[in-house]
Amino acid sequence: MKALVYHGPGQKVWEHVPDPKIIDPTDVIVQVDITTICGTDLHILKGDVPAVTDGRILGHEGVGTITEVGQAVSKLAVGDRVIISCVTSCGSCSYCHQHLPAHCLDDEGTSGIGWIFGHLIDGTQAEYVRVPFAENSLHKMPEGVSDEAAVMLSDILPTGFEIGVRNGRVEPGDVVAVIGAGPVGLSAMMTAGLYGASRIIAIDLDDNRVQQAKGFGATDGVNSGDAGWQDEVLAMTDGLGVDVAIEAVGMPATFLMATELIRPGGTVANVGVHGKSVELKLQDLWIKDIAITTGLVSATTTPMLLRLVAQGKLTPEKFVSHRFTFEAIIDAYDTFGRAAETKALKVAITR
Ligand SMILES: NC(=O)c1ccc[n+]([C@@H]2O[C@H](COP(=O)([O-])OP(=O)(O)OC[C@H]3O[C@@H](n4cnc5c(N)ncnc54)[C@H](O)[C@@H]3O)[C@@H](O)[C@H]2O)c1
Ligand SMILES: [Zn+2]
Ligand SMILES: [Zn+2]
């Protein structure tokens, strides 16, 4: 088969590799019908994720068709169409029992992290992929859901919902600020309405993204490059601050922004992946009764989100801004990697 193989920082090749094989009886093999690229893949290519080594097939998002099942697999069959979750879960370790498969302990001997595709094992940017713990890690595609909608349920939609909206404890009537209107921030905006937020404020430096956010559930938009942006946000509240501030960038400055916008008693939900140490101004924050949450997506809400997609209540297919075939995956990376110029949100890569 052919796959996108990582060969060290800055190096990736679409090349021939051996077909994946069933290793454990709980595995299945999936022929990938559609995959996409995540910002995390760009981090890996920069060399920011040293656990990813030369020869690794990238990708942790995808929808496909099962072509082979292991001996212990009874609930899935050849021909089933499935969504591949970015997090695999053994289903039996203590973290899986606590509904935290993000920290699944039984991930092929490399304990403590459920995100292994395109990281610790070969991923989904390939014609075929081996899926371990398949019955716990795949979701059957319901009728009437498009591949382009479904592939957003592998990672970005559960991330925005679980780590942004749910950790942020959004309640009816809340004013929610989302800092960062990339695919993950937009996913938080798209799902904040599920809990009845009264206002959802998109904050970004990129005017195009602030504008785009209105199509993803944002009621208001603010460019944080403008002088007085903070007053603009406060004017959208009762003057005391937002109830929930979701950080979806991953920079010290944007985390600080979240802690400055929050009202006493509010919640700052950090979603961004931080590479640098971040200042926490506890001397100002302790008296505000705020909560700060962090998290790695577990993707346990994918079945619920899928029901909403099937009912037309969520329409994540609108994330797809560009389309490519597997043979053009290098062009897909180029377009996605220059998102500010190309206005790319998510690229669909199909066979
Ligand atoms: N916690 C998790 O489980 C998890 C899972 C997936 C992704 N993530 C992280 O979520 C974050 C967002 O992911 P994404 O794919 O949407 O990223 P992205 O890079 O596409 O989007 C980030 C957005 O932030 C904006 N931005 C940058 N600097 C800013 C600033 N100073 N002020 C305001 N806006 C600014 C950019 O213009 C961009 O629109 C990343 O850090 C990613 O690694 C976390
Ligand atoms: Zn991802
Ligand atoms: Zn587990």
Image (cartoon, grey):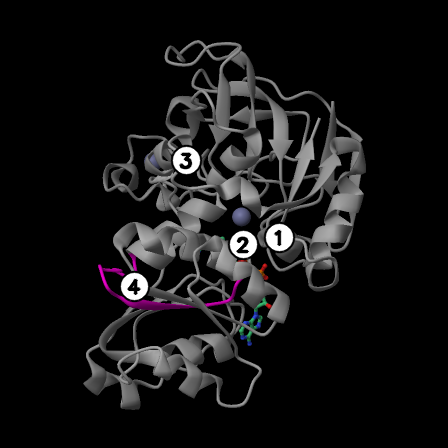
- Which tag is nearer the camera, tag 2 or tag 4? 4
Residue 298 is situated, as x and y percent measured from the top left of the image, at 37, 44
Residue 308: quadrant of the picture: top left
Which circle, 3 or 2, is nearer the viewer?
3
Task: Give the class, few, some or many, for how many residues have Cα within 10 Å of label 4's Cα (few <14, many ≥20).
Answer: some
**Magenta region:** 167-181
Ligand 1 under 8 Å from disc 4 Cβ: no
Marks 3 and 4, the one that precedes in the sequence: 4
Q: Is mark 2 within 8 Å of ligand 1?
A: yes
For disc 1, the marked residue is 345
Q: Which amino acid type corresponds to the residue marked 1 in the rendered image?
A: Leu
Between disc 2 and disc 1, whose residue precedes?
2
Q: Which of marks 3 and 1 is in front?
A: 3
* Front position among marks 4 and 1: 4
Disc 1 within 8 angstroms of ligand 1 (CB): yes
Q: How far apart are marks 3 and 1 (CA)?
A: 21 Å
Q: Distance between the residues labelled 4 and 1?
A: 25 Å
- Decide which of 175, 36 is in the foreground and name it: 175
For mark 4, what is the residue?
198
Amino acid residing under circle 3: Gly
